[in-house]
Amino acid sequence: MKFSHPLMHNNFTKKDLISVKKLLNQKNIILTQSRQVEKFENEWSKWLGVKYSTFVNSGSSANFITIKTLQILNKNKNKNEIIVPTLTWVSDINSLIMNGFKPVFVDINLSNLSMNLEQVLKKINKKTLAIFITHAQGFNGLDNNFLNQIKKRKIHLIEDVCESHGATHRGKKLGSYGLISNFSFYYAHHMTTIEGGMICTNDKKIHEISRMLRSHGMAREAKNNIFEKKMINQYKNLSPQFIFLYPTLNFRNNEIGATIGLSQLKKLDNDNKKRTKNFKIYLKYLDSNKYFNKYEIKGSSNYAFPIILNTKNLYIRDNFEKYLKKNGIEFRRGNAGGGNQLRQPYLKKYVKIKNLNSFKNVDRVHFFGYYIGNYPNLTKNKILKIVKILNSFAFN
Ligand SMILES: Cc1ncc(COP(=O)(O)O)c(C=O)c1O
């Protein structure tokens, strides 16, 4: 049989199927957002260590609602800049554009694929409202000096943890540091709800706004009786059930997604332990002459293994891709989100990019970086085979 190493394998288990069957076998079932969604949100909050979570239909919906919430709460319209990494998912940037914010880009570190925090601190000015960090591919992007500095300067931290479920900083989970954090449950990530995302916060008002933004901007979705009564009084000529406060769409998830999420959450920590063990095996045997290997793995939780070639030769790069394909190893070039966001066409109309070539690390990942699978049921033998294939590639 031909060797095959996919990006993800068996992420939907028999136990998940049984829990869905149980749901579907109930009498008078409701499959749109209801009790299972609420239960999943509560369990997720407990797991993460935050007060509130809002389950939505994708990680990018979580990004959009988060930034829209910031826009709604922002009283100082001169503060319209948000600092973002050049290596992230497209929705982290376009949620800013769609809500009238200016993205201010910084380069990344190769060691954790996350924002260069020194550059972030240098770019803070009186227009900076927030920093929207991406904890890329399971790595921790935080450090203490950075957290202290932005606290002192009253800059909001928003965490995109869509690729880093279970990763920690000083033993505390990523996603519990920021004012708001986002997760994705897309199939290829640490756990799945088919499609799905979560918005997490300790702030009650933010939580209520997120809930309304998830559901047509309706006042009753805040689930706050005092607030709802106030709105009904304020808008006496409207039907009390249909008071639409904000322009948004329907970003709800459903009972099937939540049921799968509850089932998957039970195995998340154990799966992550296996991923970390596997990551270390990859790293131990990979040829450091051929591939970058100085990753900061403390607190990380990697659903993928990053590969950065030690070459700047595009011909070798193209041969490497042919070689991986021939050997059955699935890959994505550009790591998280296809590499340098500044090089993507969608941005050209909105952001003037004067210094495209000055983001050296993200460009290295953009042209010579990849990720391959690191799913829980990978065996040591299989990793050793993969590494043998990688180490046998001729860089000439
Ligand atoms: C860092 C990051 N943010 C947001 C998203 C969007 O998540 P989704 O695919 O669930 O919309 C992704 C998706 O892969 C991502 O990697």
Image: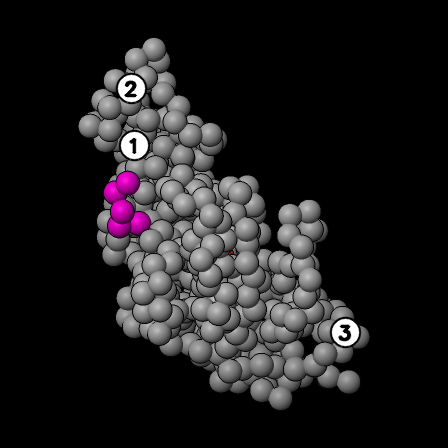
Q: Which residue is mark 2?
A: 234
Distance between mark 2 and mark 1 Cα atoms: 16 Å
The amino acid type, in three-letter code, at marker 2 is Gln
Q: Quadrant of residue 133?
A: bottom left
Among the two numbered marks 1 and 3 on one chain, the one whose residue lies closer to the N terminus: 1
Label 3 crowd (10 A; few <14 / some 14-19 / many >=20): few
Distance between mark 1 and mark 3 Cα atoms: 53 Å
- Residue 49, can we see it? yes
Q: Which residues are magenta?
A: 201-205
Residue visible at 67% across and 55% down in the picture: 352
Task: Depth check: give the residue in front, 69 or 191.
Answer: 69
User: Is 153 one of the magenta-colored residues?
Assistant: no
Label 1 crowd (10 A; few <14 / some 14-19 / many >=20): many
- Residue 382, can we see it? no
Foreground label between 3 and 2: 2
What label does residue 222 carry, if any? 1
At mark 2, the secondary structure is helix
Foreground label between 1 and 3: 1
Foreground label between 2 and 1: 2
Q: Which quarter of the rendered picture does the N terminus lie within? A: bottom right
Distance between mark 3 and mark 2 Cα atoms: 63 Å
Residue 154 located left or right of residue 86: left
The amino acid type, in three-letter code, at marker 1 is Ala
Task: Depth check: give the residue in front, 260 or 1.
Answer: 260
